Image (cartoon, helix red, strand yellow):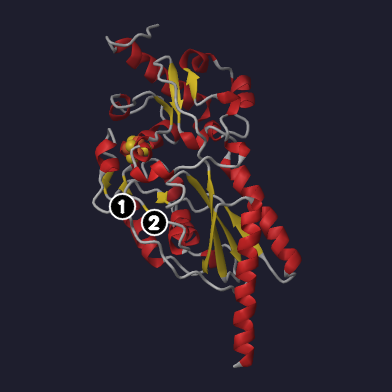
């Protein structure tokens, strides 16, 4: 009995210390949950893939093994016992320029690449944990299991899954990056789930210009401007996207911009997320003139490089054609 009490006390204090250290690293929200297979979430992911909602992101549906790996942390770290789920606020108080000669960049991509920023903080946290408890082993995950970051965050009580399918936190709205640290340590687990506060609101479903949110918490990537302008590797954007692009060059924030919970946004203290070169949009004519070398230098360690030069220029050309065809546009080439 005494041994069990001591074990429980030790893991409580370990969890508390790890959380305190995570906050000291700069994370805004931290929760700890048991490392177990995400059965329900895997079933939902399988159904989403079966419906073809992943579009041309074939890597998501590659094989059963990669699906299992994404939904079971014990396949990432064999002796996994705990998952530390973290959120980092990335909101900065800047806006897009209302100018048809500019292409808007999604807010998440204004600053430095979040993989690098979160990855460095999680690695530093893991190094500290190893110093405290030499038996500790861990794996850092940032976007390693794309659909699952949100599942861990929900389980860890960081927020709830909004109808636009992004995690919403009470304190920072949905402007948060998520990551995990999988550990072989037994810890005290958070059990309090944040209840769904979307209620009857359907603003994100109504605002989406392509009806990509087919039902609450289900996004069909084939219809999503964000997917089309970032992930789609085709020479031309589908007509559904170009007819509804609304000035988006890279990504789309429409469903998050209309969310009432994003009234609770607060500026981040992380300077790496300030807009690079003070830009929240890019001049379209400048984008189509970019050379490969200029593109590589300009978007080094920026999320925008994900679209590749070809994708960015394809998106810019589409916006220029739309501006030219729009009789009310003040910008023509
Ligand atoms: S990102 Fe844009 S296109 Fe995609 S679901 Fe949200 S509003 Fe619709």
Position of the C terminus, as image quadrant, is: top left
Is label 1 in a helix, a strand or a loop? Answer: loop
Q: Quadrant of ligand 1?
A: top left
Total marks placed? 2
Asked if residue 191 lies left or right of residue 12, the reply is: left
> Residue 75 location in percent, x, y?
54, 65
Q: Residues within 10 Å of mark 1 (few under 14, many from 20)?
A: some
Q: Residue furthest top?
A: 333
> Residue 284 location in percent, x, y?
46, 16
Asked if residue 45 lies left or right of residue 176, the reply is: left
> Does the image show residue 154?
yes
The label shown at residue 160 is 2
Asked if residue 97 lies left or right of residue 189, the reply is: left
> Residue 16 location in percent, x, y?
61, 68
Q: CA distance from mark 1 to mark 2?
A: 9 Å
Position of the N terminus, as image quadrant, is: bottom right
Q: Which sits earlier in the primary sequence, circle 1 or circle 2?
A: 2
> Residue 104 location in percent, x, y?
44, 25
- The answer to whether the residue bearing label 2 lies less than 8 angstroms from the nearest atom of ligand 1 is no
Please tell me whether residue 302 is drawn above or below residue 168 in the rendered image. Answer: above
Q: Residue at x 24, y 39 (%)?
A: 206
Q: Are marks 1 and 2 in contact (CB under 8 Å)?
A: yes
Q: Residue at x 36, y 65 (%)?
A: 40
Asked if residue 207 lies left or right of residue 84, the reply is: left
Q: Quadrant of residue 241?
A: top left
Q: Residues within 10 Å of mark 2 (few under 14, many from 20)?
A: many
Is label 2 in a helix, a strand or a loop? Answer: strand
The label shown at residue 217 is none
- The answer to whether the residue bearing label 1 lies less than 8 angstroms from the nearest atom of ligand 1 is no
The label shown at residue 198 is 1
Comparing 35 with 74, the one in front is 35
């Amino acid at each position: 009995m005494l041994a069990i009490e001591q074990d429980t006390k030790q893991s409580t204090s370990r969890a508390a210390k790890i959380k305190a250290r995570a906050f000291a690293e700069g994370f805004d929200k931290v929760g700890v949950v048991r490392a177990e297979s995400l059965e329900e979430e895997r079933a939902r992911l399988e159904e989403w893939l079966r419906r073809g909602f992943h579009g041309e992101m074939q890597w998501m549906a590659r094989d059963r093994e990669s699906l299992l790996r994404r939904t079971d942390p014990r396949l990432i770290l064999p002796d996994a016992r705990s998952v530390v789920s973290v959120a980092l606020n990335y909101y900065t108080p800047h806006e897009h320029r209302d100018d048809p000669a500019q292409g808007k960049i999604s807010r998440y991509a204004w600053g430095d690449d979040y993989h690098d920023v979160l990855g460095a903080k999680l690695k530093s946290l893991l190094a500290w944990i190893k110093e405290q408890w030499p038996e500790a082993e861990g794996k850092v995950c940032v976007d390693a299991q794309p659909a699952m970051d949100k599942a861990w965050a929900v389980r860890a009580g960081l927020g709830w899954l909004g109808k636009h399918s992004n995690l919403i936190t009470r304190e920072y709205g949905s402007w948060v990056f998520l990551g995990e640290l999988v550990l072989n340590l037994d810890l005290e687990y958070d059990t309090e789930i944040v209840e769904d506060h979307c209620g009857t609101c359907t603003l994100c479903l109504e605002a989406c210009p392509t009806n990509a949110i087919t039902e609450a918490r289900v996004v069909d990537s084939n219809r999503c401007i964000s997917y089309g302008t970032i992930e789609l590797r085709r020479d031309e954007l589908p007509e559904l996207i170009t007819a509804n692009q609304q000035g988006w060059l890279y990504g789309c924030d429409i469903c998050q911009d209309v969310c009432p919970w994003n009234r609770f946004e607060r500026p981040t203290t992380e300077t790496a997320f300030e807009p690079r070169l003070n830009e929240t949009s890019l001049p379209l004519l400048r984008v189509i003139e970019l050379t490969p070398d200029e593109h590589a230098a300009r978007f080094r360690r920026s999320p925008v490089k994900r679209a590749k030069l070809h994708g960015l220029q394809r998106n810019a050309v589409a916006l220029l054609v739309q501006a030219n065809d729009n009789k009310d546009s003040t910008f023509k080439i």
